[in-house]
Image (spheres, rainbow, N blue to C red):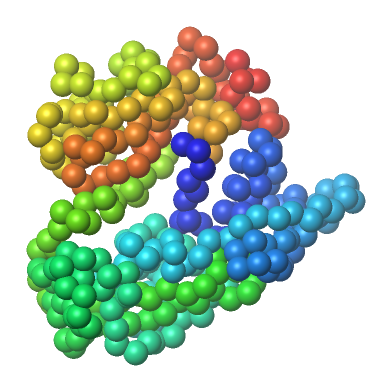
Amino acid sequence: MLARVYRYDKPSRNVFLDILNYSNNTAFELAQLDIGLPVAVDHTLTSVLVKPSDNVSWTQEVPLRYHRLDLRQTFGRIPLVIDAPDNEPSTILLALREQYGLYFDADQISLVQAERKLDSAVVSEQLTAFGSADVTEVVIPGEPDPRSTGEDDFTITALPTNLIWVGAVDVLVRRTFPLLNRNIRTGLAVRQYFHDTRQHKVPVELIVEKTADATAHSAKIKLLKKDSFLQGTSKFNEVAKALTGDDWVIQTQAADFNLMGAKVIHNGFNVGEFYTGFARFSHVLVLELGELCNNLSGFWAIQYNDAESYKYTDFRVDRGPLLDM
């Protein structure tokens, strides 16, 4: 984990605060700070002036520099396709939050209907999959033809005032209709996966509840040592199933939810590079999923408390686990 992965399921000011606190090992709160408007230095390089709010007595102000994220580069290989009952901006933004865990501030983006097209990254990957360099329109096997009715392209563009995002990205909205008091998709399909695109698996963080507490399994978790790999003799799949509800396995054949070969990147205090953002957990286990896991990839941070070395208190201003011991 050389780079910290943040969640983008909250307003941009909250995400910016997470980045500020993580970078400085601080615990500032939004009510304490006055965050200025971002100013583009380069395409993603950004400057913003942060100063104390009227709620505190400090007077210093600090110019900060950081890199915003380019929407197209971030989601180029994971096309944004949502199911929604209508094309209202509020409905689309809500669907993005519920289906992708992406929160876009309505006042920091523009959302406009675009000309019918497939995202260039989707086209590129499908051309690779089919071995053709001459196809200009591609229909993904197993998916409804995107040129059919009931689907619309929209473009989300980050405004200059956006603290986190720059650039633009396309969103395909597939209409749903009510049936027995539930909104359903009218185009039914089984998504097919190509071998060439297996490397673009869903990040494991997207399917795991970020506040999940594994303290009840701490005895088993503590047995895992840094730089070790999960093998068939391990029973950790039982812990994983208890945390997510999925049928995790540890087997030598490639499979969905397969923990075989997962590497223990960290198993220790919930601080520094591995801090999860929840100080009430003293420890964190970080697993890097292996190639034998077909559907998921990336780092899985599993939070827990070790009662033998830690006691959390809400009254610590800094809330630093190492200082609460």
In what quadrant of the picture does the C terminus appear?
Answer: top right
Query: Which residue appears at 29% of the width and 22% of the height?
Result: 229
The answer to whether residue 104 is seen in the rendering is yes
Give residue 72's quadrant in the image: bottom left
Front position in the image: 250 or 132: 132
Q: Residue at x 37, y 16 (%)?
A: 225
Q: State whether residue 255 is above or below residue 136.
A: above
Q: Residue at x 26, y 35 (%)?
A: 290
Q: In the rendering, at what x and y percent does residue 124 appear?
A: 27, 70
Q: In this view, does 126 lie to the left or right of 269?
A: left
Left or right, 196 with reference to 323: left
- Report x, y in % for residue 204: 32, 44
Whether residue 209 appears in this view of the structure is: no
Horizontal and vertical percent position of residue 106: 52, 73
The answer to whether residue 208 is above or below residue 324 is below
Position of 151 compared to 43: left or right? left
Q: Is residue 145 above or below residue 51?
A: below
Q: Which of 288 and 197 is in front in this view?
A: 197
Residue 65 falls left or right of residue 165: right
Q: Is residue 213 above or below residue 88?
A: above
